[in-house]
Image (cartoon, rainbow, N blue to C red):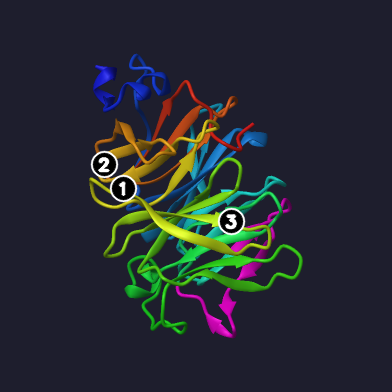
Amino acid sequence: MADADFEVLDERFGPCVKTSARVEKLYEGCRWAEGPAYFPAHRSLVWSDIPNDRMLRWDEATGAVGVFRQPAGYSNGNTVDRQGRLVSCEHGNRRVTRTEHDGSITVIADRYQGKRLNSPNDVVVKSDGSIWFTDPAYGIDSDYEGHKAASEIGACHVFRVDPASGAVAIVADDFDRPNGLAFSPDERKLYIADSGAPRHMRVFDVAGDGRLAGGRVFAKCTAGIFDGFRFDRDGRLWTSAADGIHCYLPDCALIGKIRIPERVANLCFGGPKGNRMFICATGSLYAVLLPVNGAGTF
């Protein structure tokens, strides 16, 4: 039954899902699926299969899946910037890159004060063109998701790349393992997950000059860890967890879940109306149609 795919914890979750809908498996065969990014212009989804060092592409018109890039620098998180270009975090190359429209690759960031980054994990692009990313050490902890190496920076931080100068600056330095991140729809707040010992998510106020303030705990994960997450247009936060997708209101209330039979790593909104959620979960790619639209989608 399709309604078994949803768990309503609060009546306010009711309008967010259609229990007659069902979660569809679009692809299986990954080792660790991550970083889904939807491209409206060519109706396709690109995502990472980190241990297999490849990026895959799902075609919305045909349902076909093929290799988008291999090797892929053990890519992890991906996003699409305002010009429709792919921005990626590469564990193996320890950098953040942009794939231009002609297919060439531009390095956005690979060092901080002359020291190599650890292994950029997830990335978002703000409307002013600044690029924000997390840099835990998962890609250098072992050879499974990158290349085993020592950290040159010596800690795991959150960084911002200035849109004018390209300068890389630390915006948050008190995380254990900073992971997923996303701006609220109005970009006044930045939410960041810590998949280290705290296993929680924090929220910061964003100043016009790119500085962050605050950092209170927004939520603690009730199943596994928070990894990647996204907002819908009404400000609800949809996040990965061990048992599926958890939906939170801005007041921190957990109102419902989309049940997924594998541990979820990340998600994004896409489709012609921005109301189809794509979910990367362990070895598979899933999708579900919702009556809500993703923030920033067309």
Which residue lies under the disc numbered 1?
A: 282
For the residues labelled 2 and 1, say whether their Cβ atoms are less than 8 Å apart.
Answer: yes
Which residue lies under the disc numbered 2?
A: 262
Question: Which residue corresponds to the image point at 30% horizontal and 64% vertical from the top-left?
Answer: 196
Which one is closest to the eye, mark 3 or mark 2?
Answer: 3
Which quarter of the image is occupied by the C terminus?
Answer: top right
Q: Position of residue 104 (x, y in %)?
A: 69, 60
Which residue lies under the disc numbered 3?
A: 206
Disc 1: CA contacts within 10 A as few (<14), some (14-19) or many (>=20): many
Q: Position of residue 49 (x, y in %)?
A: 41, 53
Q: Position of residue 77 (x, y in %)?
A: 48, 55
Q: Say what amino acid the circle numbered 3 marks.
A: Val
Q: Secondary structure at mark 1?
A: loop
Q: Which residues are magenta?
A: 97-118
Q: Say what amino acid the circle numbered 2 marks.
A: Glu
Q: Position of residue 48 (x, y in %)?
A: 45, 52
122 to the left or right of 100: left
Q: Give whichever of 272, 44 is nearer the camera.
A: 272
Disc 1 or 3, which lies upstream in sequence?
Answer: 3
Membership of 194 in magenta stretch: no
Which quarter of the image is occupied by the N terminus?
Answer: top left
Q: Give whichever of 57, 96 is nearer the camera.
A: 96
121 to the left or right of 259: right
